[in-house]
Image (cartoon, coloured by chain):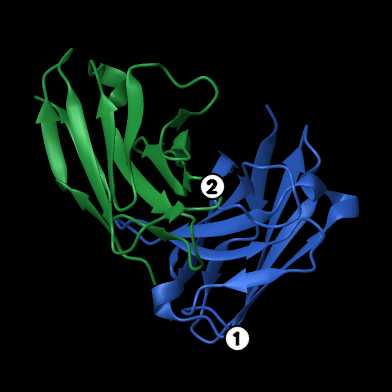
Chain colours: A green, B blue
Amino acid sequence: DIVMTQSPDSLAVSLGERATINCKSSQSVLFSSNNLNYLTWYQQRPGQPPKLLIYWASTRASGVPDRFSGGGSGTDFTLTISSLQAEDVAIYYCQQYYDLPYTFGQGTKVEIK
Amino acid sequence: EGQLVESGGGLVQPGGSLRLSCAGSEFTLSNHAMTWVRQAPGKGLEWVSSISGSGGGTFYAGSVQGRFAISRDNSKNTVYLQMNSLRDVDTAIYYCAKDGVVGDNPQGYMDVWGKGTTVTVSS
């Protein structure tokens, strides 16, 4: 199984400041035939189901504010919130869909400092 | 945008069975693979099972292989998860989610999620 490891486990950021979450996979999730990274990011607010933020590592889902951006390739990825808003308080998960079983990172909790 | 509504959760004794349902509205589920993901209390997300749009392909996590069965009835726009031989560790919120790509085979990222149904396995 591909192991997904996120860092940090939690972070506290001031409103309007940048938040960066890292995600590392135990093997590459870049499919060479189409040059796509099979990596997605979800946001889970308290008491809510997960919400798709980013897919193919860097494509924002419909309706997602442009302060959210995804980057990276191969085994190392980042989710950046450029200017943290109060509604961004949540747990963020990365997930690989390169191979079954699909696996998630352990989650990163983002709070307001 | 369409929505997914799960049902069928509840309290069951170890060794018991439950069948979860996931009904879709405002989109045609047969155009998409579907997935069940669970979340144990206070824990992260765990992929459980996926099914192709036609129902011809089914995929399972090792932890549920042989105990759970995913199926779908496209005429009812509904996906099911039959859970047998339930264990304490199966206690979780079970989410149904739609594959983000139109097609038969699962692509693996989920763009629409239901609110979940809670399964509690306890004596």
Give the mark nearest the N terminus, 2 or 1: 1
For the point 29% across and 40% down, which residue is it?
Answer: A91
Residue sitting at 34 percent across and 46 percent down? Answer: A93
User: Within 10 angstroms of label 1, few (less than 14), some, or many (20 or more) residues?
Assistant: few
Query: Percent x, y for residue A27?
Result: 33, 63
Q: CA distance from mark 2 to mark 1?
A: 24 Å
- Residue at left offset 35%, top offset 32%: A70
* Left or right side of B12 for A3: left
The tag on residue B109 is 2
- Residue A111 location in percent, x, y? 17, 31
Can you tell which quarter of the image residue B35 is in?
bottom right
Q: Dot 2, crowdedness within 10 Å: few (<14), some or many (≥20)?
A: many
- The residue wearing badge 1 is B66
Q: Residue furthest top?
A: A16
**Which amino acid type is shown beneath numbered disc 1?**
Gly
Q: Nearer the viewer, residue A8 or A35?
A: A35
